[in-house]
Image (cartoon, rainbow, N blue to C red):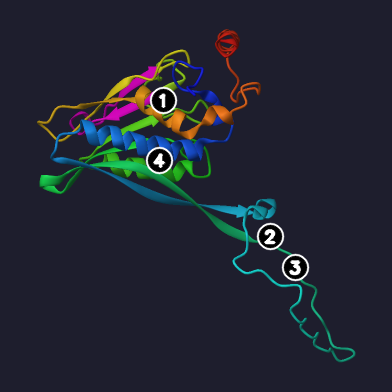
Amino acid sequence: MPSPFPGMDPFIEAGGFWPDFHAGFITYMREWLVEALPDDYDVRIDERINFIHVEDDRLQRFKPDLAVSVNEPRLQRASVSPGAATLEPIVLPETVEEEIREVYIQIIKRSEQRLVTIVELLSPTNKSEPTRGQFLAKRMSIIQQPIHLVELDLLRGGRRHQFGRALPPGDFYAYVSRVEQRWDCQVYAWSLRDALPTIPIPLAAPDPDVLLDLQSVFTLTFERGRYQRWLRYDQPLTPPLSPGDESWMAAVLKG
């Protein structure tokens, strides 16, 4: 079933389905680009890995690699001679590293064996600490190279990109950073009430841009993911909507 919203469905983010949606959206966006790109281009899905430190109560999210059977024989306690001094332990929390994998799209010009464009769909980990700093560092390393960068921000929560001037008003954004226009960025903004736009994906000069229909990609991702079976449209959104958008959304959900 389709989403009741004309464009992006904010309950995907609020309902905790973003990792699954992210993977599906990247996959179907790749399919769209494969059909739209000139024959000399290939599309690859790659991934990067971030690590964050996890402590204390969050350790319950991890499962050990080995299980201890209750039927195993117990170790014999070593005897301590009378009068021997023993040390009192200091209890410290364990610290582990949680691995976060993020997939993105690479557009490669086959005849030159050259990476031309990277297309990203931002995740909550890209927009909040402690991994935002890692993301921004990798973003800067990309735009310092002769590589086009296209970023899609379909999340209402988290921190937005910062530029020399304020972003235009909107709930969602697409950022197109072209090699030939560094250090400027083309920003596309739209609201919750709008359909997702069609945006340009720059290629190697002199090849013209290819147009990516984000609404078609979203619709396919939503329907194949069957999210409407799971989304709770009676739950409040985070971050909350403005009073005007709240009234509009109520009318949309009533049908």
Mark 2 in CB contact with mark 4 (< 8 angstroms): no
The residues colored magenta run: 173-189
User: Dot 1: few (<14), some (14–19), or many (≥20) neighbours within 10 Å?
Assistant: many
Secondary structure of the residue carrying tag 1 is helix
Q: Where is residue 63, by image quadrant?
A: bottom right
**What's the amino acid at mark 4?**
Leu
Tell me the mark number nearer the camera, choosing from 2 and 1: 1
Secondary structure of the residue carrying tag 3 is loop
Q: CA distance from mark 2 to mark 1?
A: 45 Å
Q: Where is residue 152, by image quadrant?
A: top left
Q: Between residue 5 and residue 130, name the one nearer to us.
A: 5
**What's the amino acid at mark 2?**
Pro
* Residue 45 visible somewhere in the drawing: yes
User: Dot 4: few (<14), some (14–19), or many (≥20) neighbours within 10 Å?
Assistant: some
Q: Which residue is mark 4?
A: 136
- Vertical placement of 116 versus 230: above or below? below
Q: Between residue 246 and residue 53, name the one nearer to us.
A: 246
Q: Return the disc, 2 or 4, that comes first in the chain's sequence.
A: 2
Q: Which residue is mark 2?
A: 93
Q: Which residue is mark 3?
A: 90
Tell me the mark number nearer the camera, choosing from 1 and 4: 1
* Place of residue 210 in the rendered image (x, y in percent of width and height, measured from the top left): 21, 27
Secondary structure of the residue carrying tag 2 is loop
Q: Residue at x 23, y 39 (%)?
A: 147
